[in-house]
Image (cartoon, rainbow, N blue to C red):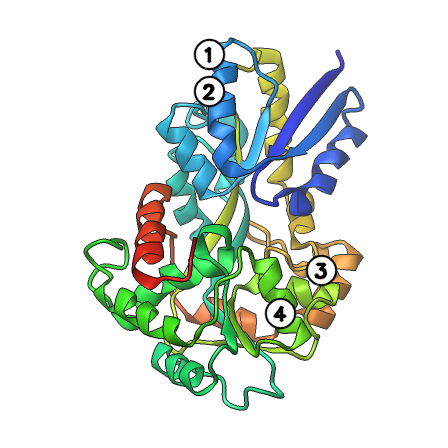
Amino acid sequence: AAVTINVVDVAGSLALLQEAIESYKTTHPNVKFTFTKAPAPELPSKLKAMQNAKRSDIDLVLGGTDILAAGIEQNLWVTLLPENNAKFAPLTENYLPEVKKMQELAHNQGLAVAFMPAGPLLEYNPDKVKQVPGTPQELLAWCKANPNKLIYARPANSGPGRTFLMGLPYLLGDKDPKDPVKGWDKTWAYLKELNTCIEYYPGGTGAVMKELGEGSRDMTLTVTGWDINPRALGVVPKEFKVGAFKNMTWVNDTHYMIVPKGLAPAKQAVVLDVMAYLLQPKQQAQTYDKGYFYPGPAIKNVPVTMAPQASQDTLKEFGRAEYADWIAKFPHVQPLDAQVMVKALDRKSRRVGKEC
């Protein structure tokens, strides 16, 4: 029978996955898809209302750790494992080691589908920055010597902003990088000092890249995807460079596939089959995209040579040879969980200033 699967994206995941999802129809022509984008904070209450009314208009959610944690807290998601081990275990066994750690955050209520060892990294105009800072202290010194030339977006609305915030406790040697309330004394003192030479924090990363590209700023904090993709799109000049902090720790990022409760068994079976399809190498290769969530694949043995030619061409021209070395060289950690991240964002807003 014909079936329509309604997919909601709260993290920009469709840029990586929509073509792969739609390719499912080539072997299952009776399955159709609708795609909707929604703000992550609004979705849990909408799903709760649907589930209380015993109806479901959303069949598959694509999102990050924030929506995953919010739904776990409100008991909105189907538990996928071990109930569906026969379908998923052979696939999830192929997860990259770092993705296996990210999968632990799902508490078996989501499946990792795309992966980015995000940052924090520094992106800069090489005509204006002759020696890229290698430590937070060097960054602070550069910022004070070049006031208002460093910019990054408000962490509440920016992946690079959040990654910088979560990465600093490791760089500064704070007492407990997982506890922003009691363990980040060095981080909060550093950010307050850095604030003195930053004009303002834009509401999103797109605005940051626009200012960087137009030349009103010389340096920003970034992540792999936000380095590659804006240069590929022409927002930031191709020749701009990226630098890593000495002894950095990667704060990883992941997109998940999540199933809301309340689906009819027949429809849920189709959704699970689509999810398994997206974890196969051919579909995983499409997550290379145009560097938006670099590298993209969550499973092993998916080299860029498997990606669509357009992705290969983009990454050949705008990718960074040094990323492979840095990803292998530096340690990786999970991001803060959503509830702890809320505390960190609130504390930054109150302690650092210039934020709504």
Q: Please, what is the three-letter code of the amino acid marked with disc 4?
A: Glu
**Res 96 seen here:** no
- Nearer the camera: disc 1 or disc 3: 1
Q: Which residue is mark 3?
A: 305
Q: Which residue is mark 4?
A: 211
Q: CA distance from mark 4 to mark 3?
A: 34 Å
Q: Please, what is the three-letter code of the amino acid marked with disc 3?
A: Thr
Identify the mark nearer the N-term, 1 or 3.
1
Q: Which residue is mark 2?
A: 48
Q: Which residue is mark 1?
A: 52
Identify the mark nearer the N-term, 3 or 2.
2
Q: Residue at x 64, y 46 (%)?
A: 284
Q: CA distance from mark 1 to mark 3?
A: 47 Å
Asked which secondary structure carries label 1, the reply is: helix
Packing grade of label 1 (10 A; few <14, some 14-19, many >=20) is few
Q: Quarter holding the N terminus?
A: top right
User: In the rendered structure, are the residues bearing label 2 and label 1 in contact, judged by CB atoms less than 8 Å apart?
Assistant: yes
